[in-house]
Amino acid sequence: MPTFKLLLLPGDGIGPEVMAEMKRVIAFLEARGLAAFAIEEDLVGGAAYDAHGKAISEAAMAKAKAADAVLFGAVGGPKWHKVPYEARPEAGLLRLRKDLGLFANLRPAICYPALADASSLKRELVEGLDIMIVRELTGGVYFGEPKTITDLGNGQKRAVDTQVYDTYEIERIARVAFELARRRRNKVTSMEKRNVMKSGVLWHEVVSEVHRREYKDVELEHQLADAGGMQLVRQPKQFDVIVTDNLFGDMLSDVAAMLTGSLGMLPSASLGEVDAKTKKRRALYEPVHGSAPDIAGTGQANPIAMIGSLAMALRYSFGLAETADLIDQAIAGVLAQGLRTADIRGEAKRTVGTAAMGDAIIAELERKSA
Ligand code: IPM
Ligand code: MN
């Protein structure tokens, strides 16, 4: 069995707590001979700032580049609200995305039947929901230059962010979406704002062109991103794969996450280009949720998104789809048993903490693999 090189970056807030539960799942997989890993760990975000004065060290970046997959917890918190903009905790994550070339962010929003009542929408609207948001992750307004605040000298300042996309960036993210759709329900919805943005005009044109040239067998639909947001909360089950830019994808994926009951449920994969020679791609896996400083250290965080992110690593980086399914089924299993962390409480009377949820998932894994 190959040994996969993992870099663990627990980060700040609840990051280390949820990652501790994920490590127990790793230990389970190794003990069962289901996978073998060489594991390194390093700091990112505020934790790295406290140790090194920057949001990620060069040594940690080098480890990330050498890894088969990076597993990332969460970054940020009030403790670092006053650090310089360049060293803010989020800068560590953004640098990882950019320098590893992780242009494709996959955010599956699945509503487990047991959680349909934890959603803010009615059960019939979300039960069985299974959508995949494909967010462009290394371009657009997140990285466009100029990005400045200038003092105009008259008591006014001017802030500039730049939304910029080249054809190749739109082509490659569109291909990721179409490929995924072929293995799902064969439908892609592309979202942009071509009615006010030039980048939206180009986005629409390029996605349509890639579709015409290479993916005629897949159904393609276009929605303006504002209307798309509305449709996501009106009738979410109309969607299969949604492809959109970096900023719209950030917002729409938080909306989609809440449909499933809680942000604490959603894993994500950030993938680079497949290397023609090695057939490998750089990859980082992380929960969609943040560092939740309000509950950090209290043992209440939901570890499911982090454990689900490990399952995505098995699926997308290591070709271990069956083991990934096993983990996903163990998660569904504990939810069906009625176990709930506080974020997905719904009507449940009793909630469990982070470690008890981890215990239950391990027990379910043991049962299902016996
Ligand atoms: C996310 C987060 C990040 C983003 C932050 C932490 C920089 O909100 O992954 O969705 O905006 O991309
Ligand atoms: Mn976000």
Image: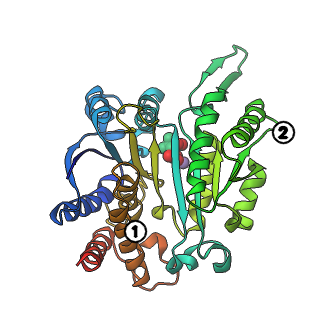
Taking 29 as reference, is 249 left or right? right
Q: Quadrant of residue 194?
A: top right
Task: Give the farthest residue toward the top.
Answer: 153
Residue at point 84%, 39% (across, down): 195
Taking 347 as reference, is 34 above or below it?
above
Observer-side mark, 1 or 2, equals: 1
**Residue 233 rendering spot, x and y as whole percentages:** 70, 64
User: Which quadrant is the C terminus positioned in?
Assistant: bottom left
Q: Which residue is mark 1?
A: 328
Q: Is residue 331 visible?
A: yes
Q: Quadrant of residue 122?
A: bottom right
Q: CA distance from mark 1 to mark 2?
A: 40 Å
The amino acid type of the residue labelled 2 equals: Asn
Model colouring: rainbow
Taking 159 as reference, is 369 left or right? left
Q: Which residue is mark 2?
A: 195
Query: Looking at the image, which is closer to me, 184 or 214?
Result: 214
Are the residues tagged 1 and 2 within 8 Å (C-beta)?
Answer: no
Secondary structure beneath dot 1 equals: helix
Secondary structure beneath dot 2 equals: loop
**Within 10 Å of the Cα at label 2, are there few (<14), some (14-19), or many (20+) other Cα atoms?**
few
Query: Looking at the image, which is closer to me, 155 or 24?
Result: 24
Q: Is residue 165 visible?
A: no
Q: Quadrant of residue 76?
A: top left
Task: Give the farthest residue toward the left.
Answer: 31
**Residue 252 rendering spot, x and y as whole percentages:** 64, 52
Taking 50 as reference, is 308 left or right? right
Residue at point 67%, 24% (across, down): 160
The amino acid type of the residue labelled 1 equals: Asp
